[in-house]
Image (cartoon, helix red, strand yellow):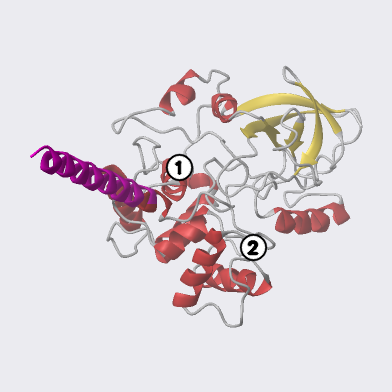
Amino acid sequence: MEFTLLTGKRVAMMVLAFASFFLISIGETKAESLLGDKLLHEGKSHEQVSLLQELLSERGYIESEVQEGTYDQATRNAVMSFQKEHSLLTDGVAGPQTLGALQVLRQGDEGQVVLALQEDLAALGVYTGKLDGEFGPVTHRSVKTFQQENGILVDGLAGPQTYGKLHKALNNPGTLVSPSSSSSSNEASSSLNSSDSGTSSSANSGSASNSEGSTSSSSESSSSESSGQANAETNDASSSGTDRSGNTSASQGQTMTVEATAYTAYCNGCSGITATGLDLRSNPGKKVIAVDPSVIPLGSTVHVEGYGTFIAGDTGGAIRGNKIDIFMPSREDAIQFGRRTVTITVQN
């Protein structure tokens, strides 16, 4: 009898152990089932690149042989084809918007790519729930509201068409929700952690609102995926000495009033590399601002009244005219900063 009971207990323990392992495995699989926690770009080798290649192949975008698991030129070309066809930022980098569109997010999904979606919708004033990376009923309703407002199929699924409209909306500054221009930031700070019934802040938490998965207002620094495009525009503007609004470049010692926002190196879709090649993630203490080079030349030393002296070392597609974007190592600090009017002096 003792042998039978002992054997039974051992069997029961083995069954429980197997069941626990099975349940944990399912949980891990679900957590890792969505791409989006890593920015995928040319030269990167990772198992997520293999999953990306599978998605692209299933949708007919892989037209030539690719090196499995390596983000090679063929993979980049496929990503760009997908981006171009669906009106996304065409830069060949697979960030949250591109990955979200490829996977078609729906209720029950979770992860960084869902968080990026929530942040984008919050920046547009459509999502007022918690920024928790969980595609629940509130996110589902927000997606449907956005779809209805933009005249596309209302199904609550975030796919290519929805992301295409989302990218377009995020690049229209008039549609973005931003904090008060007052220097008081308590309202913006408290709204970040709001519940489903609250409002979500859209203060800059990262650079590049036209990059994949930006969370911010119209601020858009080139540590995003689109620095190359911004640099090209910079060269065109600099050749004439004026920006597209007719603003002339600031001369040494010139003082001016500008609109200031803030960004970090860790926004969704950001590489952390500035237009001048500085790695902000490796150098979080650097005092850098993003500028319109046709107004403030890159490399200039700029004193921002009340905040210190910075190097004009970055650019951004939405930083045009008398606007600057101040790099901050902390997302919380960037959100609290919000949008302010400041006085700057271009020192050299």
Q: Residues within 10 Å of mark 2 (few under 14, many from 20)?
A: many
The stretch of residues the image draws in magenta is 1-28
Camera-side residue of 259 and 21? 21
Residue 12 visible in the shown view: yes
Compared with 175, 236 (above or below) is below
Of pointers 1 and 2, the one earlier in the residue sequence: 2
Disc 1 designates what residue?
119
What secondary structure is the magenta-colored segment mainly?
helix
Camera-side residue of 2 and 211? 2
Q: Position of residue 109 (x, y in %)?
A: 34, 51
Residue 9: say if magenta. yes
Q: CA distance from mark 1 to mark 2?
A: 21 Å
Looking at the figure, which quarter contains the C terminus?
A: top right
Q: Position of residue 125 (x, y in %)?
A: 40, 41
Q: Residues within 10 Å of mark 1 (few under 14, many from 20)?
A: many
Residue 267: say if magenta. no
Compared with 174, 51 (above or below) is below
Q: Position of residue 136 (x, y in %)?
A: 28, 45
Residue at 69% in and 32% down: 326
Q: Position of residue 58 (x, y in %)?
A: 44, 76
Q: Quadrant of residue 47?
A: bottom right
Disc 2 designates what residue?
91
